Amino acid sequence: MSGHTPTRRAPLLTIYSVLVFIFIYLPVAVLMLYSFNRDGVGGFPPRHLTLEWYRLLFADAPIWDAVGNSLIVAAGSVALSLTLGLLAALALDRATFPGKALFRRLVLLPLILPGIITGLSLLMFAVFAGAQLSLLTVFLGHGTALISVATTELFAGLQKMDHAQEEASLDLGATPWQTFWRVTLPNLKLSLIAAGLLIFTLSMDEIAVSFFLIGRDNTLPLEIWGRLRRGITPEINAVSTLIFAVSVALIVIWYRVRTRGLGSDAQELLERLQQDA
C-alpha cells in the first residue's frame, strides 16, 4: 500500500511546483513584456511592440550615472568582502582561539539580520565616526554586510582543500607566505570567483543598506525606487528587465563555477580511491 503512495503524489507535487513557479515568475514575465509595449503600462495583452523605451533608457543620463555608481560600489564591495572574508575563513579553518565558536556564529549574523537593521546600525556607526554620507559609506556598508557571504564560501573551499599540498610546499623549503600565494590561493580560485560573483550581484541589488548610507549620488536600485514613487513607466520596466537579465547571468555563472568545483572534487576523490585500490 505504502509503495504506491509516492506515485500517486507525484502528479500533485508536479502541479504544485508549476503553480509556485508561475506565482513567482509570472509578474517578472509581465514586467519584461510591458518593457516592449508602445502603449505604456495599461492594457493587456500588449498589442504594439516597440524598442522605444530601451532607446529612451540608453539616453537617460541619470540612470547611467546611477549604474556607474552601483558598479563602483559593487566592485569595491567584492574586493573588501573577499579580503576580510578570506582572513576570517583562514582564522576559522587554521587557528585556535578563545571564543572561536561564537566568532563563527557572529560572522554569519549579517545573513540573518534584516537589511533595515544592518543599514540603521551602520548609519549610527557612521554618524558616531563623523563620516559624511557618500558612495564611500555605501561601499563600506556593502562590504561589511557581505563579509559573511565571502567567509561562508571561502571557509567551505578551505574545508575541501587538500592540505597535503601545503605541507609538501613547506617541507620543500617554501615560506608560509610563498605557500599561501603559490598553493593556497590557487586552490581557492573557484571559491573566490563564486563568492565574488555572488557578492557583486547582491551589492548591485542592495537597497536597504544603501538607503541609510547614501549621500547625494544615487545607486541604481535607489534611482529606480525614487522614480517609482512618481509612478511605473515602461522605461522602469526596461531597466528592470536588464537588471534581471544581468542578475540571472551572474547567478548562472556562479552556479556553474560551484558545480565545476564540486565536479573536480568528486574526480579527485575517485582518483584517490582508484590509487588506494
Image: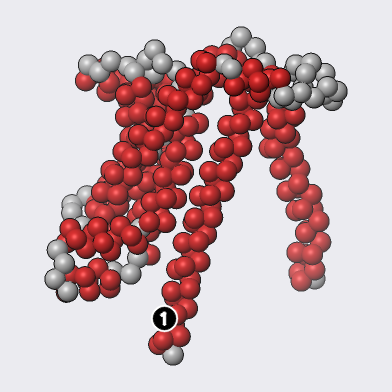
On screen, residue 271 versus residue 15, left or right, reads: left
Q: Quadrant of residue 27?
A: top right
Q: Residues within 10 Å of mark 1 (few under 14, many from 20)?
A: few
The location of residue 128, given as percent across then percent down, is 23, 18
The location of residue 148, given as percent across then percent down, is 36, 43
The N terminus lies in quadrant: bottom right
Q: Quadrant of residue 249?
A: top right
On screen, residue 134 versus residue 67, left or right, reads: left
Q: Quadrant of residue 125?
A: top left
The location of residue 152, given as percent across then percent down, is 38, 50
Q: Residue at x 57, y 37 (%)?
A: 246
Q: Residue at x 44, y 33 (%)?
A: 203
The location of residue 15, given as percent across then percent down, is 79, 49
Q: Which residue is mark 1?
A: 272
Give the answer, above or below, for where 274 lies relative to 143.
below
Give the answer, above or below, for where 216 lies relative to 136.
above
The residue lying toward the viewer, choosing from 125 and 31, is: 31
**Residue 108 shows up from this direction:** no
On screen, residue 256 versus residue 109, left or right, reads: right
On screen, residue 17 versus residue 177, left or right, reads: right
The C terminus lies in quadrant: bottom left
Give the answer, above or below, for where 259 lies relative to 251.
below
Give the answer, above or below, for where 18 lies relative to 218.
below
**Residue 206 shows up from this direction:** yes
Q: Residue at x 61, y 31 (%)?
A: 242
Amino acid bearing label 1 = Arg
Q: Residue at x 35, y 65 (%)?
A: 161
Callout 1 secondary element: helix
The residue lying toward the viewer, choosing from 185 and 206, is: 185
Colouring scheme applied when the structure was drawn: secondary structure
